[in-house]
Image (cartoon, coloured by chain):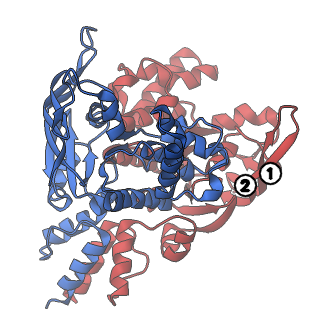
């Protein structure tokens, strides 16, 4: 597997020289593999959003190096503009940034600014809207008449139209109803599976992370404190709770049953897996 | 006793106007809501995005008034604008984003803002601020800047700010949508305690099914109407219907449902971890 992004000893300090310096990131070392679906978790203020902004060059690390596709993005001759195309960033409540008169124009805004030929711009926006499941009859309407979930998907399409290889999303499901959450998550899974886009999903929902992520990165106070497959990470219930997080409800049930002597593997983190394992345990005499 | 909230055929229409002020489009956000809530109840309101939950919440606080029908809050008709301030004093509102509702640089000043505006005498304000902050477990942070608090702590300060106005009812519109798991838990625990100990009527709007399991009664909204109502047990036993309304069931209830489908005889209305674990241990030992 090739490494799409690598961070070496990355630290970030806000407000240097202001007297209110705050270390947001401390000595981060990370490798992101191409095609991975990563869940990035941590309590409010743990440094997740700062990290996201470093990845696409919006902020510059105070110390340390970041490599995209093997090249140091802090090299003098590095093309930052290309990095911002390759690493798409979807902020919290991205629909607040919709502004054009029609859905199509909004999605085309990014590629048009790249100076691409009109046909290419149109093709990209058409494909991006398809990927997020916005139907053709909506492309000429004002984005402001759409539902909350549709607006969010249009905003994500705007980033996809830049054809990123790596997509970083900061709480893209916040405020959506359960079906809306699932729609966004399935879009992300499809982007990874079909378009081979690497996904870094910042979320507070351990249940969603358990269901969708290949690997979890846990942050606390600006540091990466745990890292690994969800079923490994969610064994650390107490540790996660201590740092403002938790484990999926399914995992909690399994942990409780285990404490009462039930012989069920730790590795069940979704409702379906848990039900299967509990069933087997019940059948055993 | 008369119910604390009575909505009867409540309708709300938003109208869009062109440059000349002519109405070009009307959207019916609430379409004949009938609802009664008793004083001291913990009520949850569920519903898809755009189902009318937030519009309804704004009516309870007289931020919006009925297009048709009536809404009585503590006996006051919200259609009568003379009641606006009184309605807002008995029914306080907490919104989704804590950063949009905290205005002061010091926690205790922020909490004192409401009672000060109500004309409460200064020494009484400080009494109320102290009591409210203690009630939400934020007293030790009283001298701090809200900027240094976590999302969950800020929301509890916002709740204290409402409590300092001594309301009979708190309406919370997705108060946990932006919070991490521990912040979410702290807000829900705080609200539950206010309901139990201070007998505050709670109206909680949320997309998190797990937050609803402790409520006395649940209303499900769809397309501006109340489409389902009942206790959490009754509501979450109807998973197929909830799905139609873009909702779901708590994860624990999902595990139980999967097991039932495999032929394990579990109750249909399991709501939390304790219940599921207890039922399973009983089955195993049987």
User: Is residue A147 placed above or below A260 in the rendered structure?
Assistant: above
Of the chain colours in the picture, the one used for chain A is blue
Residue found at x 41% / y 66%? B250
| Chain letter for the red colouring in the rendering | B
Using the image, tell me which numbered label, if any, was put on residue A123: none
Q: Is residue A101 above or below residue B239?
A: above
Please state the chain letter of the residue tagged with numbered disc 1 in the rendered image.
Answer: B
Q: Earlier in the sequence, mark 1 or mark 2?
A: 2
- The C terminus of chain A: image quadrant: bottom left
Label 2 residue SS: strand
From the viewer's perspective, tell me whether residue A191 is left or right of residue B122. Answer: left
Image side of residue A98 versus residue B283, left or right? right
Q: State the separation of the CA atoms marked 1 and 2.
A: 8 Å
* Residue under label 2: B6
Question: Can the viewer see residue B12?
Answer: no
Counting from the top left corner in percent of width and height, residue A270 is at 28, 67
Circle number at residue B70: 1
Q: Is residue B48 visible?
A: yes
Residue found 25% across the figure and 8% down from its top: A17
Which of A271 and A123 lies nearest the eye of the viewer?
A123
Residue A152, given in percent of the width and then of the height, sits at 51, 47
Q: From the viewer's side, name the closer residue of B158 and A105.
A: A105
What residue lies at 30% left-to-right and 63% top-to-bottom?
Answer: A211
Whether tag 1 and tag 2 are in contact, CB under 8 A, the answer is yes
Whether A156 is drawn above or below A60: the answer is below
């Amino acid at each position: 597997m090739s490494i799409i992004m690598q961070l070496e000893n990355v630290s970030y300090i806000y407000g240097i020289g202001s007297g209110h310096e705050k270390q947001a990131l401390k000595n981060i070392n990370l490798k992101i593999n191409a095609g991975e679906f990563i869940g990035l978790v941590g309590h409010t203020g743990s440094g997740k959003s700062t990290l996201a902004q470093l990845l696409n060059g919006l902020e510059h690390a105070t110390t340390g190096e970041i490599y995209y596709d093997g090249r140091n993005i802090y090299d003098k001759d590095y093309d930052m503009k290309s990095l911002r195309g390759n690493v798409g960033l979807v902020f919290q409540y991205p629909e607040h940034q919709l502004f054009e008169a029609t859905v199509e124009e909004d999605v085309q805004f990014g590629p048009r600014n790249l100076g691409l030929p009109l046909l290419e711009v149109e093709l990209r926006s058409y494909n991006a809207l398809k990927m997020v499941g916005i139907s053709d009859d909506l492309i000429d309407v004002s984005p402001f008449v759409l539902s909350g979930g549709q607006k969010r998907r249009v905003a994500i399409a705007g980033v996809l139209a830049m054809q990123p290889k790596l997509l970083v999303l900061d709480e893209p499901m916040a405020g959506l109803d359960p079906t809306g959450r699932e729609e966004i998550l399935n879009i992300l899974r499809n982007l990874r599976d079909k378009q081979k886009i690497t996904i870094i999903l910042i979320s507070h929902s351990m249940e969603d992370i358990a269901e969708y992520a290949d690997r979890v990165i846990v942050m606390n106070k600006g540091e990466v404190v745990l890292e690994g497959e969800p079923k490994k990470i969610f064994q650390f219930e107490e540790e996660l709770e201590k740092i403002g997080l938790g484990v999926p409800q399914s995992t909690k049930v399994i942990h409780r049953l285990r404490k009462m002597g039930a012989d069920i593997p730790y590795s069940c983190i979704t409702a379906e897996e848990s039900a299967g394992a509990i069933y087997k345990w019940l059948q055993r005499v | 006793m008369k119910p604390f909230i009575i909505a009867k055929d409540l309708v709300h229409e938003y109208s869009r106007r062109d440059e000349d002020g002519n109405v070009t489009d009307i959207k019916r956000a609430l379409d004949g809501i009938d609802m009664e809530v008793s004083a001291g109840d913990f009520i949850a309101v569920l519903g898809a995005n755009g189902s009318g939950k937030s519009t309804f919440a704004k009516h309870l606080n007289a931020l919006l008034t009925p297009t048709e029908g009536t809404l009585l809050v503590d006996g006051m008709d919200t259609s009568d604008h003379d009641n606006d301030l009184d309605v807002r004093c008995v029914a306080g509102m907490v919104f989704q984003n804590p950063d949009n509702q905290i205005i002061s640089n010091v926690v205790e000043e922020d909490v004192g803002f409401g009672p000060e505006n109500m004309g409460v005498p200064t020494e009484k304000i400080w009494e109320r601020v102290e009591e409210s902050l203690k009630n939400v477990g934020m007293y030790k942070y009283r001298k701090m800047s809200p900027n240094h608090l976590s999302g969950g702590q800020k929301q509890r300060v916002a709740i204290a700010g409402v409590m300092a106005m001594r309301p009979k009812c708190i309406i919370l519109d997705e108060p946990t949508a932006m919070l991490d798991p521990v912040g979410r838990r702290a807000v829900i625990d705080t609200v539950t305690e206010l309901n139990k100990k201070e007998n505050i009527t709670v109206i909680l709007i949320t997309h998190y099914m797990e937050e609803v399991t402790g409520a006395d009664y649940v209303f499900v909204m769809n397309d501006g109407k109340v489409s389902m109502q009942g206790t959490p047990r009754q509501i979450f036993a109807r998973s197929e219907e909830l799905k139609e309304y873009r909702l779901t069931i708590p994860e624990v209830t999902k595990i139980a449902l999967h097991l039932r489908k495999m032929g394990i005889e579990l109750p249909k209305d399991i709501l939390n971890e304790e219940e599921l674990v207890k039922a399973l241990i009983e089955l195993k030992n049987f």
